[in-house]
Image: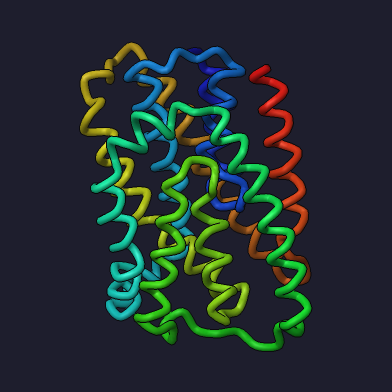
Amino acid sequence: MDNISAAIMGLVQGISEFLPISSTAHLMFTGKLLQINQNDFAKAFEVIIQFGSILAVLVLYWRKFLSWSLLKKLLVAFLPTAVLGLVFYKIIKTYLMESYTLISWTLILGGLFLIIFEYFYSKKHKEETSDQELDNISYKNCLLIGLFQAIAMIPGVSRSAATIIGGLSLGLRRKMIVEFSFLLAVPTMLAASALVLVKNLSAFSVANINYLVVGFIISFIVALLSIKFLLHYIRKNNFIPFGIYRIIAGLLFFLFLL
């Protein structure tokens, strides 16, 4: 790895983490395209740049995390992924994360689902005229959203897409569920990243600290812009373009593999 590769990976992480396009898939294929060896350092590096995205949410929404009521609801939403993640960790890490074919398929099928969902959703729901407060979300809905998020343990599904579709299907407003998805990313990504980080601590050295810094900073800055872009985008648009993008990306990944 060099500084340019680190910067590109940070850029991809920052863009893809909060958009419904799967950051895992994009990081895996970017790493393969850049011919980055998937050693312990590469795994630890991907964790560090995820912390950049987490920091972006904390900077933009730090006031929300001062609400004990909201924190409890985020914990409830996080529990399904925490429990199921521990149960299926070895299976996901050993088999699913190594399958580029599976990830290509999940991108394509996820894109089709996103398009179909938005088509029927737009027919049933008029344009939003009012906002809902995050504190008003019920514990039941938090748990259900958490179950939707758990589906994203399958690489390529997209944690953001799963939680947003889950929230919309429960009748939550688009802006509300998008922001809740941002906030829910913090405990989810912190837990997952910490687990990988502990397992790969030996990969860190002074010699490669500059790559970590470059990737982290770029991930943080780009994630800030990505969050602001999505909040602006959803005011008048749906997620069909992201569904189309997922299908194209999945097909290109297939061609790349062949």
In the image, taking residue 8 as reference, residue 138 lies left or right, namely left
Of residues 247 and 139, the one drawn nearer to the viewer in this rendering: 247
Return the x and y of residue 66 as percentages of the image width and height.
32, 72
Q: Is residue 84 above or below residue 72?
A: above
Residue 13 visible somewhere in the drawing: yes
The residue shown at (41%, 50%) is 55
Relative to residue 167, is residue 89 drawn left or right?
Answer: left
The quadrant the C terminus occupies is top right
Nearest to the observer: residue 237 or residue 103 = 103
Q: Nearer the viewer, residue 3 or 71?
A: 71
Coordinates of residue 2 in the picture (x, y in percent):
50, 13
Residue 85: x, y in percent?
30, 49
Q: Residue at x 35, y 81 (%)?
A: 139
Would you place residue 65 above or below residue 69 in this image?
A: above
- Image point (32%, 44%), residue name: 192
Residue 51 image-quadrant placement: top left
Q: Quadrant of residue 31?
A: top right
> Which residue is depicted at the point 32% across and 41% down?
193
56 or 16: nearer the eye? 16
Count the labels in the image: 0
Question: Could you say where residue 233 lies in the image, as x and y percent from the top left?
Answer: 72, 62
Asked which quadrant contains residue 77, the reply is: bottom left
Is any atom of residue 233 visible in this view?
no
- Quick check: 178 above or below 10? below
